[in-house]
């Protein structure tokens, strides 16, 4: 009985792991945040909330720091005050 239980737990763990990997591979945009602004050009590579241009699928897939096509949620009204090595944040794609 113990071997069957262990096998069942092992298979269940493998299935959960596979489902988790499949869902992270197809990242969509971050959930809408009504009290936040989408700010382009301020996210670090792999830390965007969505819209990262060619060769990316969405959230967490930007390949470049401060990509002007990738956005990250920031506190409303602060985007254009965020300074990066590539300039200020923007409310529209650059």
Image: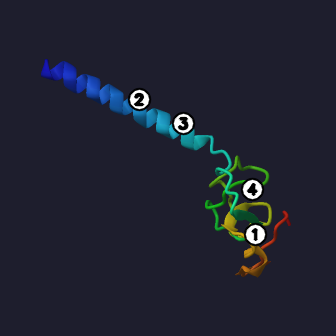
Residue 14 placed where, x, y %?
A: 37, 31
CA gap, disc 1 and disc 2: 37 Å
Please rate how many residues cluster around mark 4, counting C-alpha atoms within 10 Å: few if below 14, some from 14 to 19, many from 20.
many
CA gap, disc 3 and disc 1: 28 Å
The correct choice, above or below, for 60 with respect to 41 in the image is above
Q: Quadrant for residue 28, please give it.
A: top right
The residue at 33%/26% (across/down) is: 11
- Label whose residue precedes the other's in the sequence (3 or 1): 3
Please rate how many residues cluster around mark 2, counting C-alpha atoms within 10 Å: few if below 14, some from 14 to 19, many from 20.
few
Residue marked by disc 4: 52
Q: Quadrant for residue 61, please give it.
A: bottom right
CA gap, disc 4 and disc 1: 10 Å
Q: Secondary structure at mark 1?
A: loop
- Label whose residue precedes the other's in the sequence (3 or 4): 3
Residue marked by disc 1: 41
Q: Nearer the viewer, residue 57 or 38?
A: 38
- The label number, if any, that marks residue 22 in the structure image: 3
Query: In the displayed image of the protein, which residue is found farthest to the front?
Result: 35
CA gap, disc 3 and disc 4: 20 Å
- The label number, if any, that marks residue 79 in the structure image: none
Residue 1 placement, left or right of 84: left
Residue 83 placed where, x, y %?
A: 73, 82
Would you say the residues marked 4 and 1 are in contact, meaning their CB atoms lie under 8 Å apart? no
The residue at 62%/59% (across/down) is: 46
Q: Secondary structure at mark 2?
A: helix
Q: Secondary structure at mark 3?
A: helix
Residue marked by disc 2: 15
Would you say the residues marked 3 and 1 are in contact, meaning their CB atoms lie under 8 Å apart? no
- Label whose residue precedes the other's in the sequence (2 or 4): 2
CA gap, disc 2 and disc 4: 30 Å
């Amino acid at each position: 009985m113990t071997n069957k239980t262990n096998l069942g737990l092992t298979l269940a763990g493998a299935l959960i792991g596979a489902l988790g990997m499949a869902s992270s591979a197809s990242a969509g945009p971050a959930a809408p945040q009504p009290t936040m602004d989408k700010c382009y050009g301020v996210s670090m590579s792999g830390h965007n909330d969505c819209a990262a241009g060619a060769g990316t699928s969405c959230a967490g897939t930007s390949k470049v720091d401060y990509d002007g096509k990738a956005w990250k949620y920031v506190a409303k009204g602060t985007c254009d005050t965020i300074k990066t090595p590539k300039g200020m944040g923007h409310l529209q794609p650059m």
